[in-house]
Image (spheres, helix red, strand yellow):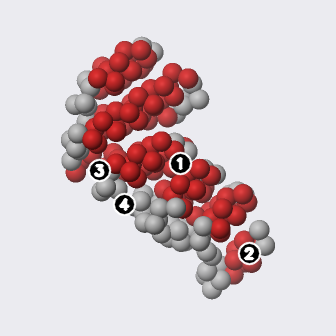
């Protein structure tokens, strides 16, 4: 099925893709992720946004049917990180609400959490959404030793720094006195 969807995508047969996603419930998340990645890179295109919406609806149906297994978790995690990076609020919401096994503080190979990735990419709505989730650990640091607040500051996202500070993110004076002072002034 996914090979057909990828071929349809490459042939720009978006209507057939949307129809397949609307009716199927047996496509594995691994295969959905492959289509998701193709669409996410061109998400400014209207057809790709429509397909992302259909993928979003498909994932909800897939979760409601409880057809997912341990192998799917890898792809749910990839969707989790990509959604934080690219600011795809709908995907963050469905994973938080429908997928009980998601660990919102899971780290990628660089030690980044979705919270850190959202801060790095100036994704205000993702930060606001994750900030209200009690499971989010707001002061975790990546392998380079930076938290979401520090990454937002270093990346020049002062508006996000304010939001992060207002939602409980902190900089440790003893590990980053210069950053602490500069962030305090914002």
Task: Looking at the picture, tell me which residue is in the foreground, 164 or 145.
Answer: 164
In the figure, is residue 119 to the left or right of 157?
Answer: left
Distance from disc 2 to disc 4, alpha carbons, whole Å, reads 30 Å
Name which of mark 1 and mark 3 comes first in the sequence: 3
Vertical arrangement, residue 130 with respect to residue 14, above or below: below
Compared across the picture, whether 103 is left or right of 179 comes to: left
Q: Quadrant of residue 145?
A: bottom right
| Callout 2 secondary element | helix
Residue at x 72%, y 71% (from the top left corner) = 183
Q: Which residue is mark 2?
A: 184
At 65% from the left and 83% from the top, the residue drawn is 173
Element at badge 3? helix
Q: Say how many tags the image has.
A: 4
Name the residue beneath numbered marker 4: 103
Residue contact between numbered discs 2 and 3, judged by CB atoms under 8 Å: no
Quadrant in which residue 58 is drawn: top left
Q: Residues within 10 Å of mark 3 (few under 14, many from 20)?
A: some
Label 3, on which residue? 73
x%, y% of residue 132? 52, 61
Residue 26: give its label.
Answer: none
Mark 1 vs 3: CB contact within 8 A: no
Q: Is residue 34 visible?
A: no
Residue 4 vertical position relative to residue 115 in the rendered view, above or below: above
Of marks 4 and 3, which one's residue comes earlier in the chain?
Answer: 3
- Is residue 65 depicted above or below 159 in this figure? above
| Residue identifier under label 1 | 85
Mark 1 and mark 3: span between their CA atoms?
Answer: 18 Å
Callout 4 secondary element? loop
Tell me, yes or no, if residue 128 can be seen here: yes
Q: Is residue 88 left or right of residue 27?
A: right
């Amino acid at each position: 099925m996914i090979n057909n969807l990828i071929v349809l995508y490459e042939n720009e047969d978006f209507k057939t893709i949307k129809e397949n996603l609307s009716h199927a419930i047996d496509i594995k998340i691994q295969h959905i992720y492959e289509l998701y990645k193709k669409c996410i890179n061109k998400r400014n295109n209207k057809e790709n946004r429509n397909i992302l919406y259909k993928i979003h609806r498909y994932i909800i149906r897939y979760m409601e049917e409880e057809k997912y297994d341990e192998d799917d978790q890898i792809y749910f995690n990839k969707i989790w990180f990509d959604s934080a990076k690219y600011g795809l609020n709908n995907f963050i919401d469905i994973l938080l609400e429908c997928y009980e096994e998601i660990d919102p503080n899971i780290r990628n190979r660089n030690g980044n959490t979705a919270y850190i990735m959202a801060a790095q990419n100036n994704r205000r709505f993702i930060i606001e959404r994750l900030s209200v989730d009690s499971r989010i650990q707001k002061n975790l640091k990546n392998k380079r030793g930076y938290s979401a607040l520090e990454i937002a500051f270093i990346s020049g996202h002062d508006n996000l720094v304010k939001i992060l500070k207002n939602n409980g993110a902190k900089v440790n004076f003893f590990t980053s006195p210069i950053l602490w002072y500069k962030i305090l002034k914002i």
